[in-house]
Structure formats: structure tokens, C-alpha cells
């Protein structure tokens, strides 16, 4: 069976490079030279980052595969044992 990974750490590195370019490097290079660069709009970059993090970071089930209901019961039982 072949697994296809559509998202991974490469996407995080790309977003980090885009943020650094938009905030630090692009304006600095533009100020030091007479060249102007096309910068990514910060609101578009924020929306892209939010969508990426929502899809890549979200949706992971808790260990054990019981869902959030089973996990909540474990937390309540652990709190009762502390008393």
C-alpha cells in the first residue's frame, strides 16, 4: 500500500520562509537597494497559514482511539483519585 503525504514539514518551512521574507528580508533588501520586490500580502499569508495549520495540525484523535468522550472520563476519574 502506498501512502501519499500531501502535507508535511516542507509546508511549514515554506510558510516560515514566506513570513520571514514578508516581514524582514523583503523590506530590508528593498531599502538597501533600488530594487522593489513583490511581497506577499500579510492578510493573505495569515489566511494561508491559518488554513494550513487547521488542516495539518487539527483532527488528530487522542491515543487509544476512544474519542473525546472516553478521554474525558479518564480525566474525571484522575481528578477524583487526587482528592
Image: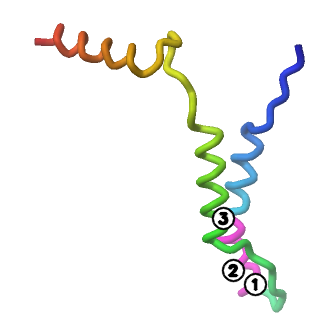
Residue 26 within the magenta-colored segment of the rendering? yes
Image coordinates of residue 41 in percent, x first then y, are 68, 74
Q: Are marks 2 and 1 in contact (CB under 8 Å)?
A: yes
Residue at 75% over, 84% down = 30
The total of numbered circles placed on residues is 3
Label 2: element kind: helix
Position of 73 with respect to 63 (left or right) is left
Q: What's the CA distance linking mark 2 and mark 1?
A: 5 Å
For disc 1, the marked residue is 30
Q: Are marks 3 and 1 in contact (CB under 8 Å)?
A: no
Disc on the earlier residue, 3 or 1: 1
Q: Is residue 46 above or below residue 68?
A: below
Q: Which mark is residue 27?
A: 2
Closest to the observer, 64 or 82: 64
Position of 59 with respect to 34 (left or right) is left
Image coordinates of residue 78 in percent, x first then y, are 25, 12
Image quadrant in which you'd find residue 15: bottom right
Q: Main secondary structure of the magenta part?
A: helix
Label 3: element kind: helix
Q: What's the CA distance linking mark 2 and mark 3?
A: 16 Å
For disc 3, the marked residue is 45
Residue at 33% over, 19% down = 72
Which of the two discs, 2 and 3, sits closer to the camera? 3
Label 1: element kind: helix
> Image quadrant for the N terminus?
top right
User: Which span of residues is magenta-colored?
Assistant: 20-31
Q: Which mark is residue 11?
A: none
Q: What is the crowding at mark 3: few (fewer than 14 residues within 10 Å), some, or many (at least 20)?
A: some
Amino acid at each position: 500500500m502506498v501512502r501519499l503525504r500531501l502535507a508535511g514539514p516542507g509546508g511549514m518551512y515554506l510558510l516560515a520562509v514566506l513570513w520571514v521574507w514578508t516581514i524582514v528580508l523583503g523590506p530590508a533588501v528593498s531599502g538597501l537597494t533600488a530594487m522593489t520586490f513583490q511581497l506577499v500580502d500579510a492578510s493573505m499569508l495569515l489566511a494561508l497559514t491559518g488554513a494550513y495549520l487547521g488542516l495539518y495540525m487539527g483532527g488528530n484523535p487522542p491515543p487509544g482511539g476512544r474519542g473525546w468522550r472516553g478521554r474525558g472520563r479518564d480525566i474525571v476519574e484522575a481528578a477524583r483519585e487526587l482528592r
